[in-house]
Image: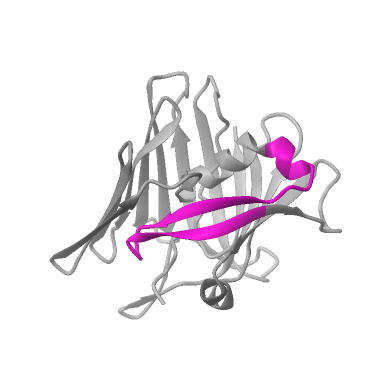
Amino acid sequence: MKTLLVMISMAFIVSRAYALECTATVYELDSQQTKPLFSVLFHADDESKPTALIHSVHRTLQGEDSTIEDVTLNQGELKEYTLQRKQQGEVLKLSVGDKKITFSKTAEGKTQTSEEDRPKNLTVGLTVVPFIRKNWNDLMAGKSIDIRFASVDRLETVGFKLKKINDDHLAKDQAMIEMSATSFFIAAIVKPLRFTLETTGEKHLVRFTGRPIVRRQTGSKFSDLDAETVYQCH
């Protein structure tokens, strides 16, 4: 199955009046953070700007760019998302209009496109955590929230549900939000994604467990993986 591109790369806060810089390390799942796979660099503009940009880069342990993501926000609303898979030579895009959203994917010299009505609660990987923050009080109160995740690989949106879950391993100042597919078919092959955030201050993302946007290379082939991604933001 094509990846859903559910990498929640980095965190920024709605109406944040300063730029945010973060780094992260992607680890092999269940390795107790002993087997690093990729590093991440992230920057988000001051959101008081009419047009704000978000930029995230995954790099191999050899320092080569693997994936590059760029988001454009207009007055805090998602307008455009671009994913470049540098090692595979692929470029995937989402453009958001007032009533329609448009996907495009260029790979192996061919371009595919699709269009659908603009859904409510539209997100991409780099905007899921801000959406969690925006709806923080409802999630902390135990409410679940439906979102439409734009999977640029599939050229369509996919339904997910966000909800707070309990975890005995969390620190006192942390909360965990689970993102699970609403489609039985998708849920059968994509494990729930889990985000650990601080409950104080700017509610920075601390940890993401699940399928990241980056792919593992084995020889000449690339494949999806599940991993643990640990963040440091300032």
Look at 65% across and 52% down and name the residue there: 207
Q: Quadrant of residue 208?
A: bottom right
- Rendered location of residue 137, percent (x, y): 73, 36
Residue 145 in the figure: left or right of residue 72: right
Residue 85 in the figure: left or right of residue 29: left
- Rendered location of residue 20, percent (x, y): 52, 30
* 30, above or below 74, in the image: below
- Asked whether 72 falls inside the magenta stretch, the response is no
* 92, above or below 203, in the image: below
* 168, above or below 10, in the image: below
- Rendered location of residue 188, percent (x, y): 57, 78
Q: Which residues are magenta?
A: 136-162
Look at 56% across and 54% down and name the residue there: 25
* Nearest the eye: 171 or 50: 50
* Nearest the eye: 130 or 20: 130
Quadrant of the snapshot with the C terminus: top right
* Nearest the eye: 46 or 117: 117
- Asked whether 141 falls inside the magenta stretch, the response is yes
